[in-house]
Amino acid sequence: MIQVRYKQFETNSSSSMTFAVSMCQVVDLEIPPVVHIETGGFVGDNDINGVYAWADWQHQVEQFLGLLKYSGVREIYVDRKLVDADPEDRFVKILRPEIILAKCFGDFKSFSEWQGYNDEWDNTSYLTKGEIKTVQTMIKDPNYIVICTDGEGNEVDWDSTRFAKMVITDEEIEAEREYLAHKKEYDEDMELGPEYGHSYNDEPQTFDDLNAEDVTWEDDDYYLTKRNRLNVKKNKKKH
């Protein structure tokens, strides 16, 4: 069953993850009989060294190695040294086994939203429509499960989220890519991006040039409207 999980945590930079999506391959994982792990990996890397670094940081190395042994790995080397592991001691806290195994031996993708505070509002980021479309597609693939997290730590079905109900066209995704590649040009003297409700002078966002002030990021023509507005602005400058 495909599930969505929510979780929030505070970082040292005074920002929080408000929503995250993980897509994990769970079928036909290529689990080798022997693995070689190198310490010193980065906890954010989606490979076996990165997961080991994460497990070490969380004091869950024995459980991580136990999960590898339980999943079919016969020999585990850490920094070229053979280590023992108990397959019965395999219950890793916090991180689900599907995520761990997909990161180590399969296909794993993740997208996330971040909320900045105070002077960090310019670092706030949201899921892109391209990412949402990817999830909408992959959630139909029986070889994957989708796990989402937000600030409450609750698991819910993807279908109950607003993202599942969004209608996103290929044209809208292309318009979004164009916007993100030229964001400064789009937003200069215009409304800010979807993460803001007001401009820096506390004036509400508007789409006055096109009389489209009711257009919101959830609409499937949001970025198309932004592109059209930019074109209107350029045409006005020419005349």
Image: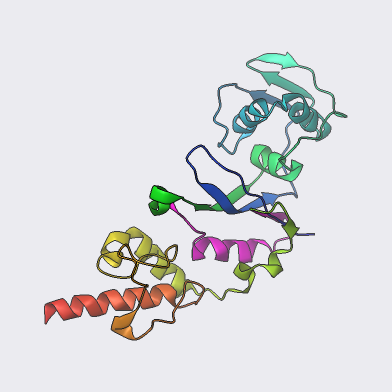
Against 193, residue 55 (above or below) is above
- Where is residue 187 drawn, in percent x and y? 30, 65
Q: Quadrant of the C terminus?
A: bottom left
Q: Classify the position of the N terminus by image quarter.
A: bottom right
Seen as rendered, the residue at the extreme left is 239
Does the magenta portion include 144? yes
Which stretch appears magenta?
Answer: 123-150
Look at the image and tell me whether residue 182 can be seen.
no
Taking 143 as reference, is 196 left or right? left
Q: Position of residue 82 (x, y in %)?
A: 73, 15
Is 161 placed above or below 153 here?
A: below
Expressed as whole percent of the image width and height from the top left, the position of residue 238 reads: 12, 78
Report x, y in % for residue 105: 68, 39
Whether residue 187 is visible to the viewer of this picture, yes or no, is: yes
Looking at the image, residue 145 lies above or below residue 227? above
- Report the residue that reaches farthest toward the right: 88
Q: Residue shown at 58%/50% (left/top)?
A: 110
